[in-house]
Amino acid sequence: VSTQSTWEPQNGTLIMDNNAMEKARMDIRSRFDGFTPNGWPSCPLMELCKKFLGELGVMNFFKQRYNKCFCMHCYPKDMPETGVAGGRKYVVPRGWARYGVEVLEGKALENKMWEDWHIGFHGMPHTSLRTQLLHGQILLPGDRLMDGSRLGVRKGHISGKRFFYSSPTIKYCELDLYATPTQWECDGIKYKVKTALQVRHKPGSYVRQRESVLACGDLCKYIGNEEIEWFTDRRSAVVVTGVLVNIRRA
């Protein structure tokens, strides 16, 4: 589906007017058999993200019924800015599209993951996404990968720390230091794309701490800087439940 004639940038976000949105939805309805749980076909942003993820070769990892778009049309301004999972607050990833990752239902049910575990986000470069999903678990610096190589520490990050870092707000994880942007072209239009993981953390398995980017002000209006960063070395206590994609015109 080409969205070239309907997308317009506003404040760095892709938007379309109501008539254009309805036209695009009908166009998608006629071309795809995939529908979101509420009966509507996936929005144009979701289909644009699908093209990007398809080029990364990761579509086999997703379960369609867990997909959800948080663009301004699918998740309007009057919808909640925060949610609660397992008694802990997280911030809704507005402006991002989520593709649900299939999880082991036995593990989820036995651990009451959907009821009790906390939601977090982990920004990462798109080049690492396929490797992460292929291994089926979170990866820590120093891990030996399937090809025999070892996972190193990304440039600009603290060496000697073998932890998985996350945050209850995408506002922290979407910083360029974590969700490194890439340039991508589709239908002749150039975009800036960022990727991140959505995860579930077992309560009591991670440590909360202050931000580590030396921020001058508040990074998120809903989560304080003093507890915005989480870290853990207990890989079995973290489950990847989704891949988040943010696409804006370059």
Image (cartoon, grey):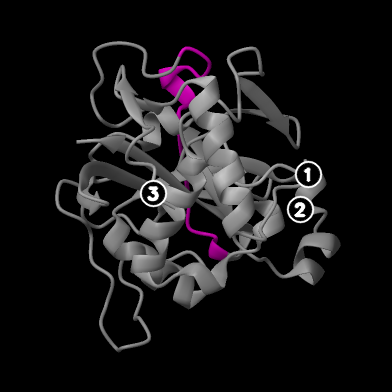
Asked if residue 62 is positioned above or below residue 215 in the image, the reply reads below
Asked if residue 15 is positioned above or below residue 113 in the image, the reply reads above
Task: Identify the amino acid type marked 1.
Answer: Asp
Q: Do the residues labelled 2 and 1 touch (CB within 8 Å)?
A: yes
Identify the residue at image location x=49%, y=28%. 20
Q: Residue 113 carries which label?
A: 2
Q: Are marks 3 and 1 in contact (CB under 8 Å)?
A: no
Distance from Cα at disc 2 to Cα at disc 3? 38 Å
Q: In this view, does 148 lie to the left or right of 82?
A: left
Q: Name which of mark 3 and mark 1 comes first in the sequence.
A: 3
Identify the residue at image location x=34%, y=67%. 55
Q: Which residue is denoted by mark 3 in the rendering?
A: 2
Residue 15 in percent (x, y) is at 42, 25
Q: What element carries label 1?
A: helix
Distance from Cα at disc 3 to Cα at disc 1? 41 Å
Q: The C terminus is located in which quarter?
A: top left
Closer mark to the observer between disc 3 and disc 1: 3
Residue 86 in percent (x, y) is at 75, 37
Identify the residue at image location x=27%, y=51%. 187
Does residue 240 appear anywhere in the picture? Answer: no
Please name whichever residue, 100 or 162, is drawn nearer the observer in this view of the structure.
100
**Residues in magenta, as a range:** 221-235
Asked if residue 136 is positioned above or below residue 79 in the image, the reply reads below
Q: What element carries label 3?
A: loop
Q: Name which of mark 2 and mark 3 comes first in the sequence.
A: 3
